[in-house]
Structures are given as structure tokens and as C-alpha cells.
């Protein structure tokens, strides 16, 4: 069975100016994959007639389905409907159902129907109207030389309702699509290049209908296996088998299967073992606690945090020895170890973790440049610290540090099990 390809075109100057973020394309891509359609390209274009026509011509040369959002409003800068009318050599015609829908919508909101909004019920005669039960702009479905073109509003909740109720089921019927399945394995603590080398032989042995993608982000790499075939059950079994092989090759670097954030996977591990945790943060300023408490149900294991940004808080609240700070400094192995041990003791938890460093962009010294970070982990068996060296970007240093602590907790729990 041949693959069915789609192209998504988002229309609107506001997207290109950066005034709004295009969330439509990501959602549409996910939903198209569910019905076996592969997205070939996503294009954002301006509210310009010639530009829209060129985009349509290009899209039809490489895709079977062209999905458009935007440019269907009642004002003069909304050109999509006019352009499509000319493009398919047709004329505008009043659609009674669309008029009834928009009239009822205005009535339900206590407004009189305006002439501008009445014009939205005039649609190209060559299209099949796509009802919009949540807004004033109907969608349009065109069929031309085996290609399907669908135009929808750019308002996300209107587009999603149209896609879910009408467009996706109709596409599934119109095209004989193969089954597409994804499996995601999330890794940490190993660079993408090293990961690729370790997995090279296995990757080369994958069957032609299963492909591997590397998706790196902030010290982590998501591995996505994508399979395509006719038998959904068989495809699922094949993917599960390959995930099993993959897991045996890099077991120490996998923290989750599926789209699970590291803090959620770690929280599940803490709950399973009945452990509690507290954080003592300096350079991360509470960001680590924020990550951990962003998980629903985190109160089962997270007890609290001390943001000891100033040295006085380190000594008076956390109990770090003044001589430790005087001899080694706030950014040191000795200080961060005391922070982790003391927050565990003061908040009566099984685990204490700590951060202290120079996030930047200034404040560094020759022996402790910006990006120098110490992190620590403490439990009933003892404590250990780790030195990190990052860059001069303050926000990245904070995010990388929180990630490193979460991974340190994961690794420490794994070592405890092995011992």
C-alpha cells in the first residue's frame, strides 16, 4: 500500500510576524498520523493572493492532501476564500446551511447578523462546505485531479472541531491509508553521536518499513521508532520487539518509554519505592522544585524546598557551617554536600539534593568561571557531589542544572538497587 502524503499551509501575516505561535500544524500532524497520513511539509505564508496560489501549486506537486488554515475572516485582509474561488475556476454561491449556522450563532450571543458575516455564508460552488458549529467561517473541501484541498479557520478550537468531526473521518474514507505507529524511548546522559554509534548495527538491521529518528533536546535524546504497514496488530508486535532490542543495548540511559517527562518518570520511581525528597537550591532558585511539583500527585514524595540564594540563608536556615563557606566558598563540593545532607535532615526526608553555582552572565572568577555548578545527592547511605561546567547563558544553565540533578537522583536510585 502506497503512502498518503499531506501538506499543511498556514496563512496569516500574524504568524510570520511572530505575533501568534502556530500550534495548529503540530496538532494536525499528530492527528493525520493517527489515520495513516504522513505530513510531507508544513508551510507558513503571508496574506497575499499570488503567494497563496504558488503555495497551492507547490503543495499539489508533492502531496495528496493539502490542508489550509487561516484567512477566512470577514475583513478585507482575509483572502483565502477569494483566492480558492479563482483557483478552482468557480464562483461564490450562498450556502443555506452555512447561513443558518452563522445566523444561529449570532442569535445565541445576542447579536444581529452583520452584512460582513452574512458574506461568509457565500462559498465557492465547486466546494463541499465543511460546517463550523463554533464560529462564523465555514470550511471548504475541494477535490481536483485526485487531490483533496481543505480550507479551515485559523482559530484552533474551530479548526480542531472541524477536523475531528468531519475532515479526518472523510479523509480516512477517501484514501486507503496504511497504518502508522510510533514508539518513543527517552534517553539521558549520552550524546546523540555516541548513541548513534552504539545503535548503528541494530539500526541498519531494522526492516524497511520501520525507521528510527533521533530527537535531541537539552541533554536528552528521544528515540522514535516509526512503523508503517497494513496490519496494525502485526506492526505493534514488530515495534514492541524492536523496542525490546533497543532497551537491551542502552539500559542505563533509558528513563522512560513514551512521551513521559523526566520528572514524571522519576516521581513514579519515588512513589514505587515509598521514598520522599527535598531540595536545597541556590543557583536554580526553585526551578528544580518547580519541575518536580509540576507533576500531579507529587505531594506523595516531595516534601519541600529551601531556596538558599544568599549565604546567610545557607548558614541560618540550612545549617551550612560558616567555616565551610569561608574556606571553600558557596560554589564548592563541600558546601553543596552540606546543603543536601542538611535539607534532608531538616525536612525529614529520605533524599536531599542541592545546587550551587554561577548561573551568569557575570559573577565568575578565573578559577570558577560562569557556568561552574556543583550538585549533590544525599540519602541514608551517604552523599555524593558532581561538578558541572556549562556556558554563559543563565537560563540554559538553570535548566541544564535541574536536568542534571533529576538524572543524578535517577542514577543514585539505580545504583542503590544494583547494590
Image (spheres, rainbow, N blue to C red):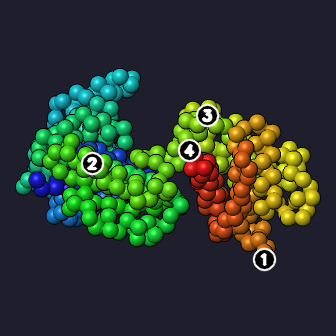
Which x, y percent locates residue 289?
66, 44
Which x, y percent locates residue 210?
25, 57
Secondary structure of the residue carrying numbered label 2 = strand
Q: Which residue is mark 4?
A: 266
Q: Mark yes or no: residue 180 visible.
A: no
Q: Residues within 10 Å of mark 3 (few under 14, many from 20)?
A: few
Secondary structure of the residue carrying numbered label 4 = helix
Residue 257 as seen in the image, left or right of residue 337: left
Which residue is more in the foreground, 80 or 180? 180
Secondary structure of the residue carrying numbered label 3 = loop
Residue 311 as seen in the image, left or right of residue 168: right
> Sequence-wise, which precedes: disc 1 or disc 4?
4
> Sequence-wise, which precedes: disc 3 or disc 2?
2
> Sequence-wise, which precedes: disc 1 or disc 2?
2
Q: Furthest-bottom residue in view? A: 366
Q: Which residue is mark 1?
A: 366
> Sequence-wise, which precedes: disc 4 or disc 3?
4
Q: Residues within 10 Å of mark 1 (few under 14, many from 20)?
A: few
Question: How far apart are the alpha carbons under marks 3 and 1?
Answer: 44 Å
Amino acid at each position: 500500500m502506497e503512502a498518503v502524503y499531506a501538506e499543511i499551509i498556514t496563512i496569516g501575516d500574524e504568524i510570520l510576524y511572530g505575533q501568534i505561535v502556530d500550534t495548529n500544524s503540530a496538532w494536525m500532524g499528530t492527528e493525520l498520523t493517527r489515520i495513516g497520513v504522513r505530513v510531507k511539509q508544513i508551510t507558513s505564508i503571508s496574506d497575499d493572493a499570488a503567494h497563496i496560489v504558488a503555495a497551492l501549486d507547490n503543495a499539489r506537486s508533492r502531496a495528496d492532501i493539502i490542508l489550509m488554515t487561516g484567512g477566512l475572516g470577514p475583513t478585507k485582509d482575509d483572502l483565502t476564500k477569494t483566492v480558492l474561488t479563482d483557483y478552482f475556476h468557480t464562483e461564490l454561491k450562498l450556502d443555506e446551511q452555512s447561513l443558518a449556522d452563522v445566523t444561529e450563532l449570532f442569535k445565541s450571543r445576542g447579536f444581529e447578523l452583520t452584512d460582513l458575516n452574512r458574506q461568509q455564508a457565500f462559498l465557492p460552488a465547486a466546494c463541499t462546505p465543511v460546517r463550523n458549529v463554533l464560529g462564523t467561517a465555514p470550511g471548504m473541501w475541494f477535490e481536483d485531479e485526485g487531490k483533496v484541498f481543505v480550507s479551515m479557520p485559523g482559530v484552533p478550537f474551530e479548526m480542531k472541531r472541524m477536523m475531528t468531526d468531519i475532515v479526518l473521518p472523510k479523509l480516512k474514507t477517501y484514501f486507503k491509508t496504511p497504518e502508522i505507529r510510533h514508539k518513543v524511548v527517552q534517553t539521558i546522559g549520552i550524546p546523540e553521536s555516541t548513541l548513534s554509534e552504539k545503535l548503528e548495527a541494530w539500526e541498519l538491521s531494522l526492516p524497511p518499513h520501520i525507521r528510527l529518528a533521533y530527537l535531541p533536546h537539552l541533554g536528552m535524546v528521544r528515540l522514535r521508532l516509526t512503523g508503517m504497514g497494513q496490519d496494525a496488530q502485526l506492526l505493534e508486535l514488530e515495534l514492541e520487539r524492536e523496542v525490546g532490542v533497543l532497551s537491551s543495548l542502552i539500559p542505563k540511559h533509558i528513563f522512560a518509554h513514551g512521551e513521559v517527562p523526566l520528572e514524571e518518570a522519576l516521581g513514579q520511581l519515588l512513589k514505587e519505592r515509598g521514598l520522599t525528597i527535598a531540595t536545597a537550591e541556590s543557583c536554580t532558585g526553585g526551578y528544580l522544585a518547580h519541575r518536580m511539583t509540576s507533576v500531579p500527585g507529587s505531594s506523595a514524595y516531595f516534601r519541600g524546598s529551601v531556596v538558599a540564594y544568599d549565604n546567610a540563608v545557607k548558614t541560618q536556615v540550612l545549617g551550612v557551617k560558616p567555616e565551610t563557606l569561608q574556606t571553600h566558598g558557596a560554589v564548592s563540593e563541600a558546601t553543596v554536600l552540606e546543603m543536601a545532607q542538611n535539607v534532608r535532615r531538616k525536612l525529614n526526608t529520605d533524599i536531599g539534593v542541592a545546587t550551587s553555582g554561577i548561573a551568569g552572565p557575570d559573577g565568575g572568577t578565573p578559577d570558577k568561571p560562569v557556568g561552574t555548578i556543583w550538585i549533590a545527592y544525599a540519602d541514608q547511605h551517604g552523599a555524593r557531589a558532581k561538578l558541572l561546567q556549562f556556558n554563559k547563558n543563565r537560563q540554559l544553565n538553570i535548566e541544564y542544572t535541574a536536568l542534571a540533578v533529576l538524572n543524578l537522583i535517577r542514577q543514585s536510585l539505580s545504583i542503590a538497587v544494583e547494590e
